[in-house]
Image (cartoon, rainbow, N blue to C red):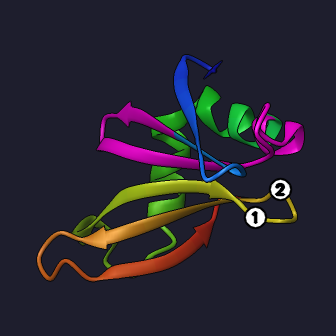
Amino acid sequence: MEIEGVEFRCEGGQLWIGDVFSGYGHHQVLLTGDNDSPDSEHVQAFSRFKKDLDKNLLEVRNKVPFGFLYRPIRIAPNNENRIGVQFKNRITGNQVGMIFWD
């Protein structure tokens, strides 16, 4: 299934996984749903975020101390339909928990 130009595949019955590319590289996108389609509210939240993907990723990265050391690796809405971005340290490989966009 394609959403906002991103191809998603259903894995495990409720998890929809897609891959999106930005100026920061490759990112995994996770949406929940059922076997037939992702949750419509998650799709809407991702669509809003994707409209200005690079700008929005930069905005979230600026919330991380020493953000220039981190690259975004995963984008996912939570149960409140807020978009979170997970980052990975470029030097240590440590991952930072989800930082919310809105």
- Rendered position, 44 above or below 6: below
The amino acid beneath tag 1 is Asn
Q: Residue at x 79, y 46 (%)?
A: 33
- Along the viewing direction, whichever of 68 and 53 lies nearer the viewer: 53
Left or right of 38? Residue 73 is left
How many neighbours does mark 2 have within 10 angstroms: few (below 14), some (14-19), or many (20 or more)? some
What is the quadrant of the C terminus in the image? Answer: bottom right
* Spot occupied by residue 71 in the image (x, y as percentages of width and height): 30, 60
User: Magenta stretch containing residue 15, yes or no?
Assistant: no
Q: Which mark is residue 44?
A: none
Quadrant assignment, res 9: top right
For the point 17% across and 69% down, the residue is 90
Tell me, for residue 78, which label it has, or none. 1
Is residue 24 a member of the stretch shown in magenta? yes
Asked whether, in this view, residue 59 is left or right of residue 20, the answer is: right
Alpha carbons under labels 2 and 1: distance apart: 5 Å
Which residue is rendered at x = 82% and y = 35% of the image?
Answer: 44
Q: Residue furthest left?
A: 91
- The amino acid pointed to by label 2 is Asn
* Image quadrant in which the N terminus is located: top right
Tell me residue 8's x, y (percent): 56, 31
Q: Nearer the viewer, residue 11 or 54?
A: 11
Please provide the residue range marked out in magenta. Answer: 18-43
Circles 2 and 1: CB distance less than 8 Å? Answer: yes
